[in-house]
Amino acid sequence: MSIDFQVQATAGEARAATLRTSRGVIETPVFMPVGTGGTVKGIRFEELESPELDARIILGNTYHLWLRPGIDTIKAGGGLHKFIGWDRAMLTDSGGFQVWSLGALRKITEEGTEFRSHVDGSLCFLSPEVSMEVQAVLGAEIAMVFDECAPGEATRDEARRSMELTLRWAQRSKDAFDELQTAVPPPPLADGRSGRLANAKPSPLTLLPVGEGKQNPLGTPTQRQALFGIIQGAGHLDLRRESLERTAEIGFDGYAIGGLSVGEEKHLMMEVIEDIAPRMPFPKPRYLMGVGTPEDLIEAVARGVDMFDCVLPTRNGRNGQAFTSRGKLNIKNARFALDQNPLDESCSCSVCRRHTRAFLRHLYQSGEMLASTLLTHHNLAFFLDTMKRVRQAIRSGQFAEFRREFTEQLHCGLE
Amino acid sequence: MSIDFQVQATAGEARAATLRTSRGVIETPVFMPVGTGGTVKGIRFEELESPELDARIILGNTYHLWLRPGIDTIKAGGGLHKFIGWDRAMLTDSGGFQVWSLGALRKITEEGTEFRSHVDGSLCFLSPEVSMEVQAVLGAEIAMVFDECAPGEATRDEARRSMELTLRWAQRSKDAFDELQTAVPPPPLADGRSGRLANAKPSPLTLLPVGEGKQNPLGTPTQRQALFGIIQGAGHLDLRRESLERTAEIGFDGYAIGGLSVGEEKHLMMEVIEDIAPRMPFPKPRYLMGVGTPEDLIEAVARGVDMFDCVLPTRNGRNGQAFTSRGKLNIKNARFALDQNPLDESCSCSVCRRHTRAFLRHLYQSGEMLASTLLTHHNLAFFLDTMKRVRQAIRSGQFAEFRREFTEQLHCGLE
């Protein structure tokens, strides 16, 4: 196992831990900015690394990177870290959620998921084996099993069918992953492909898209990755528990709760987290996928979750929405036209130190790229700083107080 | 006069000088990044201030800022520096070139220029007096006279008519400017406007657009600005000389060559610069407006120019074009798909230290904002570093050699 996870302090179900990877130490609970296509949209890596944000781990999307630029390009670039120029830790999702999100555009079978590329319309096929191959080339510290998601309002039967499929795919992911990880990389073959990929279980369609120009066998991971399992079961607690138990039986380096924040009611989401998180294997990291608002994060931490990713701070930032200690703020609003205050009086990020709401609104109204950049920066600073304060609160035995104060302030409204 | 200009070294017509302003010392020859609407597009102020770029002065566009967010918003924000959060020097153009560029959308009379706002279609009127009022509110260290431009291929008659108008407008600009600058700002009037603006010569239409909400009389410059005159005359050297002579008679803190790089042949542009620059009043800064490529800059410096602004590094960066020491490079080109080299092997900017052409191409092809950000950063780094090397070369007596080597390398092609 390439990661080491040590719980160091608890406060009720909440826990502060250290996740060691070969690319740095990550203090948890942690928020992972989403770097879909090899970039956390709107922000430079230098900012993510700065003491102000200090993002220790970012997420990469297998689906997006596989389609564009394609794994041959990333292999030629020496793996995802080297290709994009990020030397801290990364986690790659499996593409399962993305292809599931395509809705009518994809066809799910026992073997995997067939879909049309959103980039060029070509027919693609993603399966547990293909996802593991692609994630091995990407080379993130943490890979995820290929799963299927069920809609938030899935019936019991739908949710069971989906959960059973995810369990079979989890086993296949594990098998493919183990084969890829334990094989000693052989020397490159004459055709430029590594034997490992050439010997891997063939998928019905070849890996798509094929990059332009010469191939380079570099980029296969030089060290063992970690693999996380994903718990499904929609809003049905008994299915969730069964999914957890049977996923844990397969055995992973960490466990994620998937299939939440996909349209279900928020109280149902919290019910699932509250029931499932504390039951997840104790000495392993617990990752809640795709969640959520700052409040969601605090509440999930209180229920025992260690890791989070979400597009909210980046996507909403690009759309003019700022997260602040006193709630959300839409910079487009005319009431900010002459507002000389920073986005968040309590925030000490470089955007809040320097710029007024009036200026940020002007940038947004003018369609200036800098509006997205600055709002994204502030939002990430707010999310990452909130998690830092969460960790400090847990370690100093003040988490309950912090949670109460944070939530109260969030609801007291903008000045 | 609020600026002080001291020539300290020369190499032929080229000169290295120090331009002191109340917001810092600017070493010339200098390139000014263009900050049209209160932002140098695609880059944060922190990057512009970093030692790597160290932009000492940026340009703001009166036309754009006047239309959006409008002067009331900028006044409420305490002037342009404070509104945008930039505490180094700025120069504002007069809007003359921008309204001239509107072509059929504007009507030029003796009084000024009437046009439709590109933001909301409202009827606007810009004149020497209005431009000076607006520029006083913006409060840049250097303001420009309101001029009219003639097309590159203007006939002698057209060019003379335009030049004569510009001369009359130059005198009116100077008169309005002096009145605005020398008046001691009176206390705010009851209606929230400063007496200075209220007493200024009324323009046929009111200042547009009117900002939303309450007005704030702050934002009027607290110290004297400098005003530069603009030499016109299209490609006719005798008209250019006459324009220079009569503009100098009015008397300004510095002089600019306007109306170049507007469609005329490059050799004609250089002919005008070569003839006019050395004749410009010696102890005053010489500013070549809207020019140009790195090669143009070097050649104009060799002919005696001190200051430049141009959208090339920022606009072309957003469009995927990089300027390098070996010429231009279009990152969209498929030949860069697997190229593991930086944009420019000779460049030590943060983009070239960290990212490959392959990654930058991927970002561009994916429509990622980061592509624009990184190409803009590199281009500005290249322009600003080139000017730094120009200054060093002049001061160390190596300018002729530098100019030859720089130009040779530029033409030897990309590796």
Image (spheres, coloured by chain):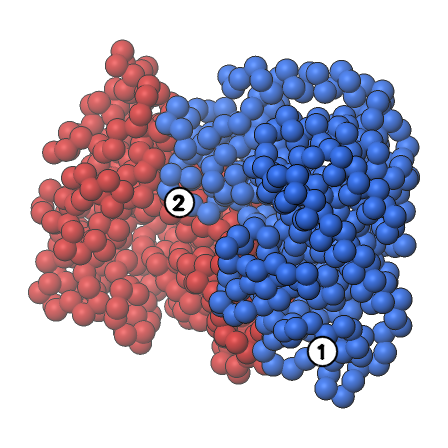
Chain colours: A red, B blue
- The residue drawn where x is 50% and y is 74% is A333
Query: Which kind of residue does numbered mark 1 sit on?
Result: Asn
- The residue drawn where x is 87% and y is 39% is B281
Local secondary structure at mark 2: loop
Name the quarter where the C terminus of chain A is drawn.
bottom right
| Mark 1 chain | B
Estimate the x, y position of residue A223 in percent, counting from the top left.
40, 30
Estimate the x, y position of residue B351 in percent, counting from the top left.
56, 35
- The residue drawn where x is 66% and y is 73% is B204
Could you say which quadrant of the image residue B405 lies in?
top right
Estimate the x, y position of residue B270 in percent, counting from the top left.
68, 28
Label located before the other in sequence (2 or 1): 1
Res B280 seen here: yes
| Mark 2 chain | B
In the picture of the structure, the residue carrying the numbered disc 1 is B216
Query: In front: B344, or B255?
Result: B255
- Residue B367's tag is 2
Extreme top residue here?
Answer: A190
Q: Is residue B326 left or right of residue A132?
A: right
Tag in front: 2 or 1: 1
Q: Is residue B133 left or right of residue A154?
A: right
Query: In front: B195, or B45?
Result: B195
Could you say which quadrant of the image residue A157 lies in?
bottom left
Estimate the x, y position of residue B355 in percent, counting from the top left.
51, 33
Q: Is residue A287 left or right of residue B55?
A: left
